[in-house]
Image: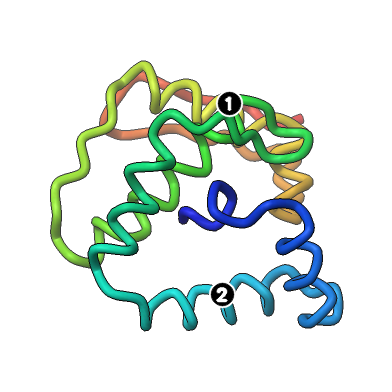
Amino acid sequence: MTMPVRYPAPRFLGEMVRSRGNFARMADQVARRDAQAPIGTLLDGWRTNENHPWKPPGGGRMGALTHDVVHGLDITIPLGIEHPVSEQALRVVLDHATTPLGLKHLGLDMTGIRLETDDLEWGADQR
């Protein structure tokens, strides 16, 4: 989750080369390596992320928020930890994730599908 703020572009590219251009492989290798770090080091990386200006390529600030909310939930939900996310932030993330670019990034064809939440009033029709 903190890799974007800890890895400057040259290091990121080096990791991508070592992973033969496969981002999923690279992210898995980095996560496994990071999992061996002391908890204090990981927490320091998380705290550094708070005011970091990182934005994913093509995603801007909404992409950065989406990254942090989604991956924060990836961590907290399986552990049964309450991860409060404001309704405003959730709406931004949901709207961003359901744009044509967001869906393309996920590799999903959701033409003709309506997405709705059951815990706040939000929905999106995919055309």
Within 10 Å of disc 1 (Cα), the crowding (few <14, some 14-19, many 20+) is some
**Circle 1 is placed at which residue position?**
62
Indicate which disc, 2 or 1, sits on the residue closer to the N terminus: 2
Is 44 on the left-hand or right-hand side of 82?
Answer: right
Which element type, helix, strand or loop, lies under badge 2? helix
Q: Residue at x 61, y 70 (%)?
A: 27
Residue type (three-letter) at the residue carrying disc 1: Met
Residue 51 point in image, percent of width and height? 43, 28
Q: Nearer the viewer, residue 18 or 70?
A: 18
Query: Answer yes or no: do the residues labelled 2 and 1 have beta carbons within 8 Å?
Result: no
Residue type (three-letter) at the residue carrying disc 2: Val
Residue 23 sits above or below residue 46 on the image: below
Q: Residue at x 77, y 81 (%)?
A: 19
Residue 87 point in image, percent of width and height? 31, 21
Q: From mark 2 to mark 1, how far is it between C-alphas?
A: 24 Å
Residue 11 sits above or below residue 56 on the image: below
Residue 29 point in image, percent of width and height? 59, 81
- Foreground mark, 2 or 1? 2
Residue 2 point in image, percent of width and height? 47, 53
Which element type, helix, strand or loop, lies under badge 1? helix
For the C terminus, give its image quadrant. top right
Residue 19 sits above or below residue 67 on the image: below
Asked which quadrant contains residue 20, the reply is bottom right
**Circle 2 is placed at which residue position?**
30
User: What label does residue 36 carry, if any?
Assistant: none
